Amino acid sequence: MTESLPVARAVDHGFAKLMPDVDRERAWLLTVDGAPQSYVDLDEPTHLEFEYAQRLGHVLDSIGEAGRPLDVVHLGGGALTLPRYLAATRPGSRQDVVEADRALLELVVEQLPLPEGAGIALHAADARGWLESAPAASADVLLADVFGGSRVPAHLTSLEYAREAARVLRSGGVYLVNLADAAPFAFLRSQLANFAEVFEELVLIAEPAVLRGRRFGNAVLVAAQLPLDTPALARRTAADAFPARVEHGAGLRKFIGAARPVRDEEAVPSPEPPDGAFGIG
């Protein structure tokens, strides 16, 4: 068996490394400027290593009928972990991946090729610009996982951006985003306020320690116009190796508190993670 060797290369927005997992034969970790971005097992694309990716996977599994193909837009590409997951769990889905870093996309598809007939189209473009040019009511799912370094860019954190997301989704569509914050949650509350202005239903999924303000961490925000299956999500996330809590309804309104939506002119990037928050050894 040929040993897999790390691959390191300067990309458009940093320095990327693909490192093989010693425990899984064809699994790889992607980092950019030292921050873990994605984990992919080419032999088992349904394996989601990162906790936040598992939570996104739970939401994706809960949308509509199990296994039914979906039209999905991914803002942010990474190593294409969730596009590969959906291609395996919902064959026949049409997926568009929008990634601003063309050199990163090229590195990933060169070293970790997509399966034949995966139905995944790749676009080297800015997420907001691509979204604004997309047809109305053209997607079942819009999944955002965009980080410039370790921060969500400001132009993806405004009320106007939330409105574009709602425009592109069909009436039964679902928006998912991976965010990161810590107490007092000024950023996370503002994001919830943005989407509460535009969507009827909101759900927040995060570890209890993060929600209690004990540490910096990821939170998955889910927004839709129609009710979400929150009991099923709560059961699945509670059963994970690192259990998460599902907040919605009155509890989530209390969490949002007096936070208000943020317009384009006042939008800011997500907060800088503290040293070691998402680092690897």
Image (cartoon, grey):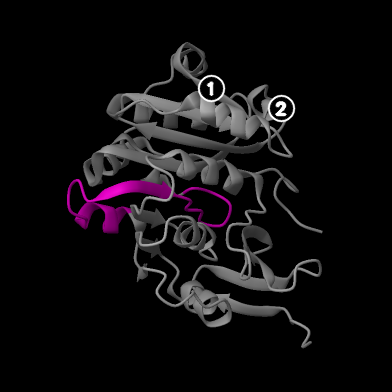
Q: Residue at x 23, y 42 (%)?
A: 170
Q: Amino acid at mark 2?
A: Ala
Q: Is the residue 194 above or below the residue 129 in the image?
A: above
Residue 241 screen position, x and y as percent: 74, 39
Give the quadrant of the C terminus: bottom right
Q: Residue at x 68, y 33 (%)?
A: 239
Q: Is residue 219 magenta?
A: no
For disc 2, the marked residue is 209
Query: Between disc 1 and disc 2, whose residue precedes?
Result: 2
* Position in image of residue 181 (x %, y %): 59, 35
Image quadrant holding the N terminus, namely bottom right
Q: Residue furthest bottom?
A: 2
As helix, strand or loop, the secondary structure at mark 1 comes to strand
Residue 137 part of the magenta-drawn span:
yes
Q: Residue placed farthest to the left in the image?
A: 136
Decide: is 281 above or below 119.
above
Res 203 seen here: yes
- Which residue in the protein does label 1 denote? 247
**From this viewpoint, is residue 186 visible?**
no
